[in-house]
Amino acid sequence: MAAKLSDVAKEAGCSVTTVSRVINNHGYLSQKTKDKVFAAMRKLNYQPNSVARSLQGKRMNLVGLIFPGIINPFFAELVQNIEEELFKKGYKVIMCNAGRDKEKEHEYLRMLQANQVDGIIAGAHNLGIEEYKQLGLPIVSFDRKLSDNVPIVSCDNYQGIKLAMHDLIQAGCKKIYFLGNEHKKGNPTDERLDAYLDEVKKHDLKPHIRSVAFSDSSNIKNMQIHDMLVENHPDGVVCTDDLTAILVLQEAKKLGIKVPKELKVIGFDGTKLIQTYHSELTTIAQPIHDIATLLVDLLLKRIAHPDEELKQMNYTLPVKLIKSETTAYKVSGKKPRN
């Protein structure tokens, strides 16, 4: 049975109030009293709560992670890598799934502040920098521009879609649809749409965009995908995440559209899960482990030297094309669907 505050007080021969004051470093207390209380705590293996420990002036070695959620395999793998890297450095994490709920993210920020975390890695997109500034904590951002003073880590989103478009065009696609969010928010992921538009212009193709938000449910995405395949007859689709690409493949199968003969599909993220269970999907792979390592390194530098100015604020890591069956080159003489 875990020791209680009253057990420590009894062992130390003092009141519960005195023990609480020692733990919280509140008011004047003799060194003799402090020594007795700490000796009793060690003997009983009593662990004060995290806030109390922080009030003793000890670093918490806690980091808050705020992300949209971990159902998506990309965020699940990224968060796992971040946690592993932090644990190696002696830190533990408090994971906050903010979804697309501003109030939820507010609540989590208040909780992280109450638990005296040493820093935050932010990957959710609900709140602006002002809410984070109020915390006065070191912050590092993933794929999200918070302010000029918060370092941001992302993959090369522009190059990723450029590689995807090049692969589809080489495969003979002429009517390529972009399946992703058309609403720009000033984040690095906006570059995916920029790259698509630049590539269709470069190759004298007509742009086709079906706006699908990352946060949209699979039912909403399926409706958009169904309409696109039935009404627009694309011969190529570039998706801004792998799960959406898989939905395209599933809907194409239902409609009897042959992939890759009649339709070529490429995704974005390239997680281990997707590569294992959907190895047929051509995708743009983000360097997830490298992203996690860099996020952790930058945050720990900010924790150790909070007043030191970083020489670089934007960190972009390279991506790679993982070529597979869904963008196999067309057989000579075969024509794409009208």
Image (cartoon, rainbow, N blue to C red):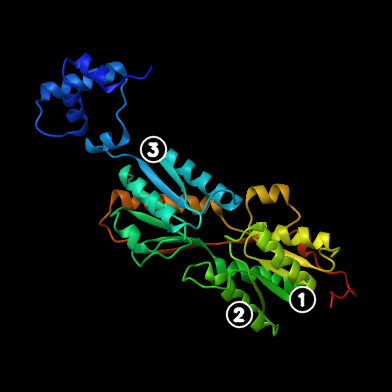
> Quick one: quadrant of the N terminus?
top left
The CA span between labels 2 and 3 is 45 Å
Residue 82 position, x and y percent, is 48, 46
Residue 328 position, x and y percent, is 79, 64
**Above or below for 221 versus 183:** above
**Above or below for 14 versus 160:** above
Residue sitting at 59 percent across and 65 percent down?
213
**Mark 2 residue type:** Asp
In this view, which residue lies farthest toward the bottom? 204
Residue 22 position, x and y percent, is 18, 28
The residue pinned by badge 3 equals 90
Residue sitting at 11 percent across and 21 percent down?
32
**Rendered image: mark on residue 177:** none
The residue pinned by badge 2 equals 198
**Mark 3 residue type:** Gly
The number of numbered discs placed on residues in the rendered structure image is 3
Using the rendered image of the protein, determine whether residue 322 is visible from the camera's viewpoint: no
Residue sitting at 88 percent across and 73 percent down?
332
**Above or below for 124 versus 53:** below
Q: Is residue 75 left or right of residue 277?
A: left
**Mark 1 residue type:** Asn
> Quick one: quadrant of the C terminus?
bottom right
Residue sitting at 70 percent across and 83 percent down?
206
Which sits earlier in the primary sequence, circle 2 or circle 3?
3
Q: Secondary structure at mark 2?
A: helix
Q: Could you say which is closer to the camera, residue 64 or residue 212? A: 212
The residue pinned by badge 1 equals 232
Q: Quadrant of residue 311?
A: bottom left
Q: Quadrant of residue 147?
A: bottom left
Which sits earlier in the primary sequence, circle 3 or circle 1?
3
